[in-house]
Image: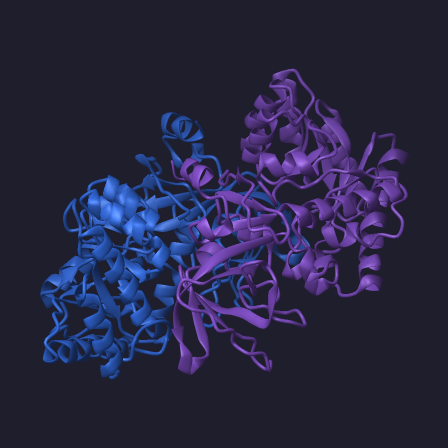
Chain colours: A purple, B blue
Amino acid sequence: MKQAQAEQIATTLGELATPCLILDAERMERNIARLKARLDGLGVMLRPHLKTSKSVDVARRVMTSPSGPATVSTLLEAEQFAAAGVRDIVYAVGIAPAKLPQVLALRAGGADVTVVLDTVEQAQAVAKASRQAGTHIPALIEIDCDGHRSGVLPTDRQLLLNIGRTLEDGAELRGVITHAGDSYLARGAEALRRCAEVERRSVVDAATLLREAGLPCPVVSVGSTPTAHNAADLSGVTEVRAGVFVFFDLVMAGIGVCQVDDIALSVLATVIGHQRDKGWIVVDAGWMALSQDRGTRKQAVDQGYGLVCDAAGVPYPDLIVAEANQEHGIITVRPGSKGKLPDLAIGDRVRILPNHACATGAQHRAYQVVRGASDRVEAEWSRFGGW
Amino acid sequence: MKQAQAEQIATTLGELATPCLILDAERMERNIARLKARLDGLGVMLRPHLKTSKSVDVARRVMTSPSGPATVSTLLEAEQFAAAGVRDIVYAVGIAPAKLPQVLALRAGGADVTVVLDTVEQAQAVAKASRQAGTHIPALIEIDCDGHRSGVLPTDRQLLLNIGRTLEDGAELRGVITHAGDSYLARGAEALRRCAEVERRSVVDAATLLREAGLPCPVVSVGSTPTAHNAADLSGVTEVRAGVFVFFDLVMAGIGVCQVDDIALSVLATVIGHQRDKGWIVVDAGWMALSQDRGTRKQAVDQGYGLVCDAAGVPYPDLIVAEANQEHGIITVRPGSKGKLPDLAIGDRVRILPNHACATGAQHRAYQVVRGASDRVEAEWSRFGGW
């Protein structure tokens, strides 16, 4: 009801109720075009990770076709995007056996959903579920390229072959997949190029090992926004997954993968108070609207809970949300800066750039779509949450 | 559709899809009874803060009557609870003038919604909106008791009187309100008693000052779970607001306001992998399910992203979620502990206690309600989000 109301009424930024999530479509389109051109140049397919947007409207703009390919982080995403016509989906979180009936239902509905796993136990469960259903669930073996999270070491020949052979007894070994989680800690193009090469080598080596043992490995999948934007060579790789590139955020700007003015997402907030003695401006966007992501804490420039811009999206120098309660944000000049607190009155509006687009987006139900410096709200796109 | 399906099918914990939010109704009822008994003893009314639960089902159990009183942190909460019959609501975040039409609509619908403010500009906006609507919007002046966030200093007589008189020119000065945010940083009963007394004195002093100037001040409102549970005397206070007491969490346990086995909220998760060399168990609950709240980071015991229990809710010694990605949690023994990693297989389930119940709850759309050690799911209660 509220959303319908917003769609009817809010035609300018000034008419929106705060806090809310603003999406600059001009920046988003630029970000999408930039990665697509890069991967075209490298001759590799883009399989965008839709966990960043959780929105059919954004998905249709970021995918290379209405039917995919796509990556998801939950089966609810798979269900939502399958219902919207996406047919080629990798569910890129290790499969829990209890979730296989849901995967089978999605596949029976026409979506080619591929699962990911890194243990023989999971492979047994996938093979068994496939045999029982009279189908072949495709699976990718997760490779651990940098010790960051899950996966089989690319040198662990025995485990790779065990998983592969277990899958081939009823299911389908479709390939290998990795994610260079450590790239988020790298700084500078040279370090990121090295991360990308480590990521590429890990899956190419694992694929070689599987193929030499007579096992199939058609898919060789890598992915993270920092490595996607810095890989110099992707020989042997068949697809790149990346998510946050569509919106970008302050963490990506801190790593050097984008500029602050590439960031397409922001939270619109209203000034609701001052503590002038302390140099504070209080706004109605706390951690519920901004998320508690503090991903820039360990970067060279700590952006607090977000970098503050004027209502048109132009950053104030060194102005951040320094503290956040549930529905209160406290804006200050960044400690150590000589920046000046702007003269904002009760009721004035600001836009706050997020540390992490996936986390901030997840706190909201819809995007209010604007374009560049225009204050016209051209659409409201819904987004979903949950599992 | 998924919710309806869950209601029909999931009758035991084992049948629930993970990750999901578990509410132990037995613990919740004990927590509610404990604070109600305490405030009855002190002779003060409870105005529970419903931002913690955002659930009509929980609200009906925590309020002292079906019509309130209640506290909310957003106007969406006010609308949802008003639609469910709550009639006495304090919207406890400083009012933005652009939100006054929504407040007027709620009041016209029969809900006595009170706003909060700490500037003359807000008081002017509330008075003007009242005059234009031919009604009297009630407002509480926010008092800054501990330098934590918003509010007028209780000694700032001139500002208090200016705000009060501005309100009385069309609106209604209903009283004063404060929140001892610093109590979250205190440790031990004696320190918390001092916080509670500072909180009490700030509003009682401000009320005295307003009344001596001939202004009305019927409501004297304090509130935080740590001070509510430790105040020795609440003379002059008319009501206590508290929210997190209904569920409790690891931050509250760290402060000493509850025990770990009072915590009524947990996230059910499934084991999806191991990194045995590193001592890691990987589960399908990352920061999307747990939130990124790291409120115990600065406490004596850092609980990571949450304390891990078995499927029945019994904590493993020193087992925490040490790292969290969007949909992956990495469970380890707490650094420095001699605890042992439990022997958990792929598909096994754990329950993770939250650092901050408000933040973890906000990541979910529903509560799966259980009672004590029983694995029967007796209800699914929906919760809402957004603004």
Residue A4 at x, y = what percent? 43, 35
Residue nearest the viewer, comparing B57 with A261: A261
Asked if residue A12 is positioned above or below residue B138 in the image, the reply reads: above
Left/right placement of residue B383 relative to residue B49 reads right
Q: Residue B357 falls in which quadrant of the image?
A: bottom left
Left/right placement of residue A314 relative to residue A41 reads left
Residue nearest the viewer, comparing A376 with B379: A376
Left/right placement of residue A62 relative to residue B146 reads right
Screen quadrant of the N terminus of chain A: top left
Asked if residue A132 is positioned above or below residue B387 in the image, the reply reads: above
Residue nearest the viewer, comparing A320 with B277: A320
Asked if residue A181 is positioned above or below residue B253 in the image, the reply reads: above
Q: Residue A57 falls in which quadrant of the image?
A: top right
Residue A136 at x, y = what percent? 70, 21
Asked if residue B69 is positioned above or below residue A203 in the image, the reply reads: below
Residue at the outermost top position: A134
Left/right placement of residue B350 relative to residue A172 reads left
Residue A119 at x, y = what percent? 68, 40
Q: Residue B228 falls in which quadrant of the image?
A: bottom left
Residue at the outermost front position: B132
Could you tell me if residue B25 is visible in this image? no
Q: How many marks?
A: 0
Could you tell me if residue A288 is visible in this image? yes
Residue nearest the viewer, comparing A85 with B105: B105
Residue A218 at x, y = what percent? 83, 31
